[in-house]
Amino acid sequence: MPAQEIDHYRSLARLGRSDITIMKSRFLGYAGAALTEEEAKAFIARVRAENPEASAVLYGYTCGLSGQIQRYDDAHEPSGGLPILEALKRPGLAGAVCAVVRYWGGVKLGASNLGRAFGQAAILAIQDAHPCLYEKSLRLMLEFDYSLLGKLQHHLEHARCRLEDTSFGGTVTMTLLIKAADQDAFTQGIQDLTNARAELLPVETCYAGWEDDTQAE
């Protein structure tokens, strides 16, 4: 986990895409999480590689846990990079990147229309990427006897956790993700349910995306 400690930041849950056509030019938007500038540059490079015939690839990103690293590029277009960056900043995203590809259709849009087109493609891609909260989280390993399997499965279905993996050997081992703020209550619930017969071990601390009711506008 990054050295800077915060409780949460707002980013994107998945890869988002958009596809719009304005005055014969096609604009393809791509948006996703990128906590570091290196991750953002790698994301942009992948977009370029997927669109070798594009007229231009513009981008913006807000990297770092507080979005302190902000960059955009117009790729020699009259406008477009800044509207992409603003589309990320408006909903308060950090650790996020958006690239918009243009396939020129032969009609000049003008700087103002072009900026709006790039901005619209960015907004739609960001919305499709599902803005969410990345909260400080704990990955845990839960190990227990087979006799507790049914009881724990039912409990975990209704608990504030995410089941990532289950393996079956001499005992059952589950890999779980919980919010760090829920650690005490979650641990106590497991211990009470199993009479302390299940072993719950920390694996790592990380940031993980959890559903957020608010959406990018």
Image (spheres, rainbow, N blue to C red):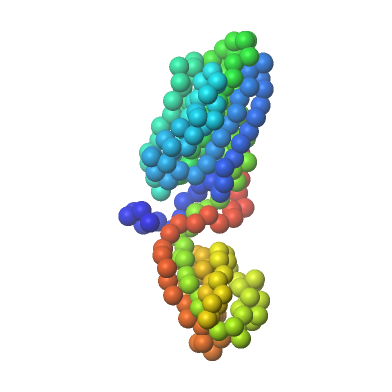
- Does 21 appear above or below 148? above
Question: Which of 93 and 36 lies nearest the eye of the viewer?
Answer: 36
Q: What residue is rendered at 59% in x and 10% in y? A: 108
Query: Outermost residue, front direction?
Result: 169
Question: How many numbered markers are drawn?
Answer: 0
- Does 88 appear above or below 100? below
Query: Outermost residue, left direction?
Result: 3
Question: Relative to residue 163, is residue 62 drawn left or right?
Answer: left
Query: Outermost residue, bottom direction?
Result: 195
* Residue 216 seen in the figure: no
* Quadrant showing the C terminus: top right
* Quadrant showing the N terminus: bottom left
Question: Which of 194 and 168 lies nearest the eye of the viewer?
Answer: 168
Question: Which of 78 and 50 lies nearest the eye of the viewer?
Answer: 50
* Residue 43 seen in the figure: yes
The image shows residue 114 at horizontal and vertical percentages of 57, 18
- Does 108 appear above or below 201? above
Which of the 4 image quarters holds residue 121? top right
The image shows residue 15 at horizontal and vertical percentages of 57, 42
The image shows residue 91 at horizontal and vertical percentages of 54, 41
Q: What residue is rendered at 66% in x and 20% in y? A: 22
Q: What residue is rendered at 63% in x and 10% in y? A: 107
- Does 55 appear above or below 194? above
The image shows residue 125 at horizontal and vertical percentages of 60, 36
Which of the 4 image quarters holds residue 211? bottom right
Q: What residue is rendered at 50% in x and 49% in y? A: 10
